[in-house]
Image (cartoon, rainbow, N blue to C red):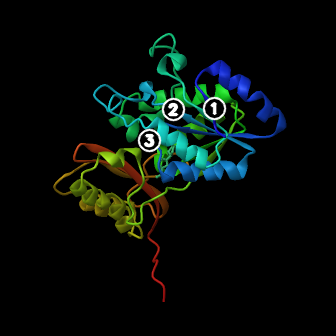
């Protein structure tokens, strides 16, 4: 039986027992759940005695003109999925519960890596995301929290926040969950028309094409060319050092994380993949 908690007081009260008698994992989400979210829940279940999933479309991580108002909200279906996955509690507060004094209050500010790539295209996005993660962790006090590698920059910045602000929650990353044809699962995929969904396959294809390139410059060129076509507007295709999230030099070889964001029709999608550069992957 999954308990639905909507206030901070209720959540604190309901979690006293599970905390005393075992470990708690938190899986923060914005709802409109899909198989990718459920893979995080399964990982959480492996690591902890109780699993709490938060469902909260966080206004402070959306910029003006972004899709906060039309972000899909499918609460009843979400709860049914989480019941089936054996989740102990859902924390689904209203905006006023989380931001009773309005949105323009104390914020967590990320370091330099929060202002490049996604942070450059969505100013303030990561400050909003880090703020809500900090609030959720303070309310639930989980032993661990699970985040998807799909949002690689967010995962990097959450780990940095936990380290920099000496939080006690351990952060666990979960691999990207994809459709059979390679498209990374996303709540925003439901916006895609049939034609846009076909075009969206270019994102994961560009990452695969860049893998094994001679160096970082070659990989960037291959990836950007794959995404230079009608119906796709590329925001960035960049190669970063996974340990700093800063772009690698053009001549870099070895491992690098390729990250991209592109608009397909009116839908903005992100994806990433760890690449091996300058090393022949041919098998004899
Ligand atoms: P969201 O509801 O989009 O904010 O996502 C909530 C969590 O699920 C974040 O940690 C995401 O990185 C993760 N997530 C979303 N889609 C996927 C996916 N396809 N594979 C793995 N994790 C995902």
Give coordinates of residue 134: x percent, y percent: 59, 28
Would residue 229 be found to the left or right of residue 117 on screen?
A: left
Q: Residue at x 43, y 38 (%)?
A: 74
Kindly check if marks 1 and 3 are in contact, taking CB atoms under 8 A apart as contact. Answer: no
Residue 87 is at least partly visible in this image: yes
Q: Residue at x 36, y 44 (%)?
A: 188
Please tell me how crowded label 3 is: few (under 14), some (14-19), or many (20+) other residues with Cα within 10 Å: many
Q: CA distance from mark 3 to mark 2?
A: 30 Å
Which mark is on residue 32?
A: 3
Q: Nearer the viewer, mark 3 or mark 2?
A: 3
Q: SS of the residue at dot 1?
A: helix
Q: Residue at x 70, y 35 (%)?
A: 142
Name the foreground residue: 12 vs 86.
86
Image quadrant in which you'd find residue 163: top right
Q: Residue furthest left?
A: 230
Would residue 227 be found to the left or right of residue 79 on screen?
A: left
User: Does label 2 point to a residue whose CB lies under 8 Å from ligand 1?
Assistant: no
Which residue was labeled with disc 1? 164
Which residue was labeled with disc 2? 111
Q: Residue furthest right?
A: 21
User: Does label 3 point to a residue whose CB lies under 8 Å from ligand 1?
Assistant: yes
């Amino acid at each position: 039986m999954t308990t639905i908690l909507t206030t901070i007081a209720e959540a604190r009260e309901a979690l006293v027992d599970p905390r005393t008698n075992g470990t708690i994992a938190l899986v923060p989400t914005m709802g409109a759940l899909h198989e990718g979210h459920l893979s995080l829940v399964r990982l959480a279940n492996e690591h902890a005695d109780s699993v709490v999933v938060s469902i909260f479309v966080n206004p402070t991580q959306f910029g003006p003109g972004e899709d906060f108002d039309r972000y899909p909200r499918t609460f009843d279906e979400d709860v049914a999925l989480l019941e089936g996955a054996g989740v102990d509690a859902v924390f689904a507060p209203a905006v006023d519960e989380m931001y009773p004094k309005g949105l323009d209050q104390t914020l967590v500010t990320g370091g330099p890596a929060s202002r490049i790539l996604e942070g450059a295209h969505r100013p303030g996005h990561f400050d909003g995301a880090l703020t809500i993660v900090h609030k959720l962790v303070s309310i639930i006090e989980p032993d661990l929290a699970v985040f998807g590698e799909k949002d690689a920059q967010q995962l990097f910045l959450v780990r940095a926040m936990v380290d920099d602000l000496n939080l006690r929650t351990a952060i666990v990353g979960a691999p990207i969950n994809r459709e059979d044809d390679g498209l990374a699962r996303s709540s925003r995929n439901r916006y895609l028309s049939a034609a846009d969904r076909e075009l969206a396959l270019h994102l994961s294809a560009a990452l695969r094409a860049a893998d094994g390139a001679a160096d970082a410059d070659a990989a960037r060129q291959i990836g950007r060319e794959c995404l230079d076509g009608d119906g796709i507007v590329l925001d960035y295709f960049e190669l970063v050092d996974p340990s700093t999230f800063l772009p690698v030099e053009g001549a870099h070889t070895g491992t690098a994380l390729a990250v991209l964001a592109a608009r397909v029709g009116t839908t903005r999608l992100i994806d990433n993949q760890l690449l091996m550069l300058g090393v022949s992957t041919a098998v004899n």
